[in-house]
Image (spheres, rainbow, N blue to C red):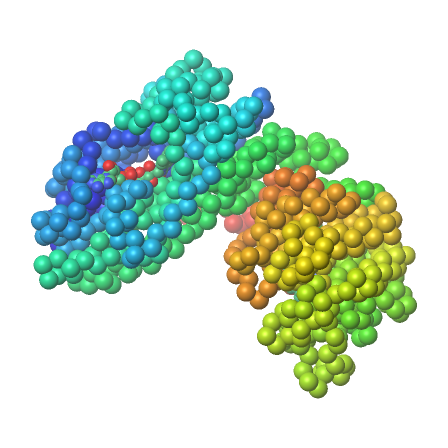
Amino acid sequence: MRVLCLGGGPAGLYLALLLKRSDPRHVVRVVERNKPGDTFGWGVVFSDQTLGNLEAADRETANEIAGAFNHWDDIDVHFRGRTITSGGHGFCGIGRMRLIEILVRRCEALGVELAFSTDVTDDEAAAREFGADLVIAADGINSRVRAKYAATFQPDVDLRRCRFVWLGTKKLFKAFTFAFEKTEHGWFQAHAYQYDGDTSTFIVETPEEVWQRAGLEAMSQEEGIAFCERLFARYLGGNALLSNAKHLRGSAIWIRFPRVICRTWTHWNEADGRRVPVVLLGDAAHTAHFSIGSGTKLAFEDGIALVRALEAHPRDLPAALARYEAERSVEVLKIQNAARNSTEWFENVERYTALEAEQFAYSLLTRSQRISHENLRVRDHGYVERVESWFAQRASLPAKAVPPMFTPLSLRGLTLGNRVVVSPMAQYSCVGGTPDDYYLVHLGSRAHGGAALVFTEMVCPSADARISPGCAGMYEDAHRAAWRRIVDYVHSRTPAKIALQLGHAGPKGSTQRGWEAADEPLPERGDPATGERNWPLIAPSALAYGPTNQVPRAMTRADMDRVKAEFVLAARWGAECGFDWLELHCAHGYLLSAFICPLTNRRDDEYGGGLANRCRYPLEVFRALREAWPRERPMSVRISAHDWAPGGNTPADAVEIARLFKAAGCDLIDVSSGQTTRDAQPVYGRMYQTPFADRIRNEVGIATMAVGAIFEPDHVNSIVMAGRADLCAIARPHLADPYWTLHAAAQLGYGDVPWPAQYLSGKAQLERNLARAKAMADERPEANG
Ligand SMILES: Cc1cc2nc3c(=O)[nH]c(=O)nc-3n(C[C@H](O)[C@H](O)[C@H](O)COP(=O)(O)OP(=O)(O)OC[C@H]3O[C@@H](n4cnc5c(N)ncnc54)[C@H](O)[C@@H]3O)c2cc1C
Ligand SMILES: Cc1cc2nc3c(=O)[nH]c(=O)nc-3n(C[C@H](O)[C@H](O)[C@H](O)COP(=O)(O)O)c2cc1C
């Protein structure tokens, strides 16, 4: 096969050498516009794991690269005059120039044709002239080929918010170094690491608006570098910052990172009656932000996958390319997801600067949500012990390492024993709104299970506020008595606290139970269990939730007064019952959420229009409840922080919503998302709503509760320790296991959590069995075994 590779960066060169290695009969030519040794950039980093992949693909190159590597383990975070060090990170750095030299030499040894100083302006002419069977577009981040065939590749290029410059220095950074410096214009950060015997990479980064305010756009290249030298002088020890981009004028060395994704990776051309594919590789196909150091890794792994696909389908190029694209696009997506979190963290450093150095550094280390608390412990046990003990002290415990989820939290007059909450979950099992013995057992057993706070489901202040005929109420004496019995049980027999969630279903009312046709109206003949028929609905606007749902009546001011009074009475009764905490449900498309969401609120009075207007009625209800609710007991609000639909609320709106509730006296925002419109397209994943809780907590300065796909103790520890949220609400895992928290403690080897005295022998056995299983897993069989 004749393969023409456009671009002699890491992607093109590595693919070329792997192709020749795979089959020396291939004729492979790499065309590179630069002269040999004429390459931009300083060092690049790889993880230890990437090196392993390279070794499997071509041992010679891997050995040479490994020999030229500078290896380090520590990460130093410098913030507000403090340095936080954590170890065990296992990275290698190599000069980009050195890397290219190694690849070029290996290409030459294997017989790859290399054409330097050749700028390809017409890929089709070059392919024809070479007689190519396959053209590889490895022409980098600004790929000309990608632009030419944009209709096929459908690139999505997202220019990110920060400006950065890639510099070098003779200062040798022994650890991977992150340094943060505040100027009168805003924060700047440096990412620095040593990559050979006498040079380090030094990348300086700041948001576009800070860069503008600091006047860097108008500065010459030299002035801009001098600015960075002054700003980071304390880390440079008198060494200069160096640029090897002398060909760029003025501030052009400062760029915004383009995040590139392509819908497809192969374009077919006609050449002399033959169909010749042009295939994207490396940065031309995708990019991953430099803060996770994976660009070159991805470029190399693309090459490895493409050669394997060609070997697997030697006589079927379309099949080989389809396999390459299918395999790599999934891998790239995973890295890009991690890279997105990391990019956003660095774009929003300002958000985290109110954190103390310990928590700031931890938030940085776990920013991608891929490195967790336990991952950090494996890397550096001592570091995790130190931050755990710092965190425990902050939570008024003795300075001793404690899993962060088992530290107390106080709000107003209430102290919760740990950070785990049983999230509100409708059980649809009341008759006439009364929670019966099922609820006593259901909530009671979860209160025995170790969570510090157990939520009721959404409890409705009137019959027409219910979602379904099985929903719980707080509008009849019988309801009040039944709730009091449950609260008394929790208080007298368990260490847990219990929270009341009040909500009105609004346009999503009068529907079937969760396990029937959820969100759909009751059948014509009525509710199968009780025969109850559909009841009329109210909402901010006369908009049905879906094609089969009832069209609600738009609320009048009289309706608003009635509903508010019903909420207030329910809250008063809740206080009388002894509930420790009150939450107002303003999420998931129910009545108050429907006011806040612009897709369901089309009013043209003072309760519709802009965000402040849309929040007006929910805030009015909240304030009335705050008045009625005892001062020493906390109140929270659950919001949908993202409507996941065009024209809906976004996480930026959620920050404003949280600000308004904070001003009205709210103690904590319970950060959920979605369910406000049937058109929503949520992006699910582990802890997928936690970034919204993080943003609200750290931008607004209010406690938050994270919820959504938090299902491991490790998730809770990481979220709480990083200051992404103060509490974690866990829903479905508590349906599977009422004792989720007690089991989590045993799993973490933390014995100091109170179990019911009646169950202590179960605790002892569980702990013993887990310790034994761990010891067996840790045991290394003897060689002769
Ligand atoms: C600031 C910064 C820091 C980075 N740090 C890291 C890191 O630590 N670790 C890491 O793995 N990655 C890092 N990267 C990313 C890494 O540099 C790229 O992901 C990697 O170089 C991709 O390789 P490539 O071969 O696809 O593209 P490139 O390296 O850009 O190579 C493309 C080549 O094509 C040539 N070319 C382009 N057009 C033509 C044409 N028309 N004719 C002929 N030749 C052409 C170019 O001259 C170039 O040599 C960093 C990137 C930046 C910007
Ligand atoms: C059966 C069930 C009922 C729910 N009922 C409520 C509810 O009454 N009020 C509420 O705010 N959220 C309710 N939710 C949402 C959960 O509180 C939680 O936000 C969601 O399930 C995501 O958390 P998870 O991934 O831990 O399950 C319910 C969820 C489930 C599974």
Residue 603 drawn above or below residue 514: above
The residue lying furthest to the front in this view is 604
Q: Quadrant of residue 548?
A: bottom right
Q: Is residue 255 visible?
A: yes
| Residue shown at 36% from the left, 29% from the top | 253
Quadrant (top left/top right/bottom left/bottom right) for the N terminus? bottom left
Q: Nearer the viewer, residue 337 or 777?
A: 337
Left or right side of 626 for 356:
left
Residue 747 x, y percent position in the rendering: 62, 50
Residue 36 x, y percent position in the rendering: 18, 31
Left or right side of 44 for 378:
right
Residue 477 drawn above or below residue 548: above
Residue 99 x, y percent position in the rendering: 27, 33
Left or right side of 204 for 586:
right
Q: Nearer the viewer, residue 656 or 461?
A: 656
| Residue shown at 55% from the left, 62% from the top | 680
Q: Nearer the viewer, residue 668 or 193?
A: 668
Q: Quadrant of residue 351?
A: top right
Q: Is residue 69 visible?
A: no
| Residue shown at 78% from the left, 44% from the top | 665
Residue 612 drawn above or below residue 217: below
